[in-house]
Amino acid sequence: MDMSGAYCAAVGEALPGVPIVFDKFHIIQLMNQRLDELRRELMREAEGPLKLVIKGTRYLLLTRADNLKEDQLPKLERALQLNEPLSQGWYLKEELSLLWEQSSYEAMNRFLSQWCEQANETGVRQLRKMAKTLQVHRRGILNWWRHPINNGRMEGTNNKIKTLNRQAYGYRDEDYFILRACLRIG
């Protein structure tokens, strides 16, 4: 699940004792939101050439390095070279995705502690906020090691249903909508 307090409370109430596992997608999504907040703040403060370098980097910053095309790298590298907080945030975002590749629960726990320490040492408000969030939700993040599950399939299904409903501008007949959704998903 994602790290929403409402979800945690509902699961805790309905299924006491069941371990909660926070989904990698939602953690990375939250990190991307923090990085984008930092980019926007730096953009507001920047002047002259630095503003031009940061402008148009949102996609580059939020995309995993492995997924960037060769011709996109110079613009990203230039923006990172000229702006230390942005550079720190981007490298920490890339590093955070390695959390789920650790060889043991203990290694994952150490990695998370080290990542949070690095984020706090930057002094960047958004990165410190992210570290605090990860520390608060530490147990649910580390539970992934014992229960390596994700909700990607469910998220995809929900997205298909929302798209179907939006494209039709809603359905008057709920049974017909359910039939359409089952045909689309199945």
Image (cartoon, helix red, strand yellow):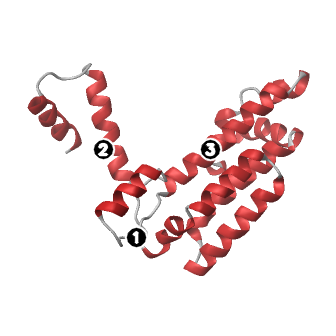
Left or right for 149, reference 80: left
Sequence-first tag of 2 and 1: 1
Tell me if residue 48 can be seen. Answer: yes
User: Callout 1: helix, strand or loop?
Assistant: loop
User: Callout 3: helix, strand or loop?
Assistant: helix
| Mark 3 and mark 2: Cα distance apart in space | 23 Å
Q: Are marks 2 and 1 in contact (CB under 8 Å)?
A: no
Please tell me whether mark 2 or mark 1 is closer to you in this view: 1
Q: Is residue 149 above or below residue 27?
A: below
| Mark 2 and mark 1: Cα distance apart in space | 24 Å
Closer-to-camera residue (65/119): 119
Q: Residue at x 86, y 40 (%)?
A: 83
Residue 174, by quadrant, is top left
Which residue corresponds to mark 3? 32
Amino acid type, residue under disc 1 in the picture:
Pro
Amino acid type, residue under disc 3 in the picture:
Asn
Tell me where residue 117 appears, x and y as whole percent: 76, 64
Q: Residue at x 50, y 52 (%)?
A: 25
Tell me if residue 69 can be seen. Answer: no
Which residue corresponds to mark 1? 19
Which residue corresponds to mark 2? 157
Residue 111, by quadrant, is bottom right
